[in-house]
Image: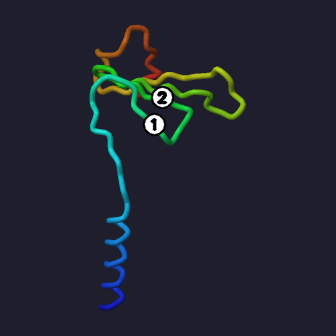
C-alpha cells in the first residue's frame, strides 16, 4: 500500500508542476511562436495558413504554404488541394 501511495504522491507533484500555456485567441492575425524559427501560422477568417520556411538545413528562400481548415469554401482562390490540411 505504501509504495502505491508514494507513487501517486509523486505523480500528483509532477503533474501540478507542469505548466501549459494555451492560446485562447481565435481572431485573425499571426500566432506568436517562441520555440521555432522555421514556420509561421497566420489565422484568417475560416482557415489558418501555415508557412514552412527553409524546411531543411542549407535551404535558402524555400517555403511551403499549407492551409488548415474544415470548410473548403472559405479558402482563398487558387489554393492547390495538395496544400490543404
Residue 7 location, x and y as percent?
36, 80
Task: Measuring from the top left, give residue 73's x and y in whole percent.
Answer: 29, 15
Q: Give the x, y percent position of residue 66.
A: 46, 24
Q: Quadrant of the N terminus?
A: bottom left
Please name the residue shown 50% across and 25% down the image. Answer: 51
At 34% from the left and 72% from the top, the residue drawn is 13
The tag on residue 15 is none
Q: Give the alpha-carbon distance from disc 2 to disc 1, as whole Å.
A: 8 Å
Classify mark 1: residues with Cα within 10 Å, few (<14), some (14-19) or many (20+): few
The residue under label 2 is 40
Q: Residue at x 32, y 91 (%)?
A: 2
Number of marks drawn: 2
Is label 1 in a helix, a strand or a loop?
Answer: loop
Q: In what quadrant of the picture does the C terminus appear?
A: top left
Q: Is residue 18 above or below residue 80?
A: below
Where residue 53 sits, quadrant-wise, is top right
Eye-nearest disc, 2 or 1: 1
Q: Which residue, as the protein is rendered here, is positioned at the far bottom?
A: 1
**Marking on residue 33:** 1
Sequence-wise first label, 2 or 1: 1
**Residue sitting nearer the eye, 12 or 66:** 12
**Decide: marks 2, 1 in contact (CB < 8 A)?**
yes
Residue at image point 69% right, 27% down: 59
For residue 40, side relative to residue 10 (left or right): right
Disc 2, SS: strand
Query: Residue 28's spot in the image, x, y percent?
Result: 31, 23
Which is more toward the observer, 40 or 47? 40
Quarter of the image for residue 45 reads top left
Q: In this rendering, is residue 4 above or below 32?
A: below
Query: Please, is residue 21 above or below residue 23 in the view?
Result: below
* Colour pattern: rainbow
Amino acid at each position: 500500500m505504501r509504495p502505491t501511495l508514494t507513487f501517486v504522491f509523486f505523480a500528483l507533484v509532477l503533474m501540478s508542476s507542469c505548466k501549459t500555456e494555451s492560446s485562447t485567441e481565435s481572431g485573425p492575425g499571426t500566432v506568436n511562436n517562441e520555440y521555432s524559427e522555421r514556420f509561421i501560422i497566420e489565422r484568417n477568417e475560416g482557415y489558418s495558413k501555415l508557412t514552412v520556411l527553409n524546411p531543411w538545413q542549407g535551404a535558402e528562400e524555400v517555403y511551403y504554404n499549407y492551409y488548415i481548415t474544415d470548410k473548403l469554401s472559405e479558402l482563398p482562390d487558387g489554393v492547390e488541394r495538395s496544400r490543404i490540411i
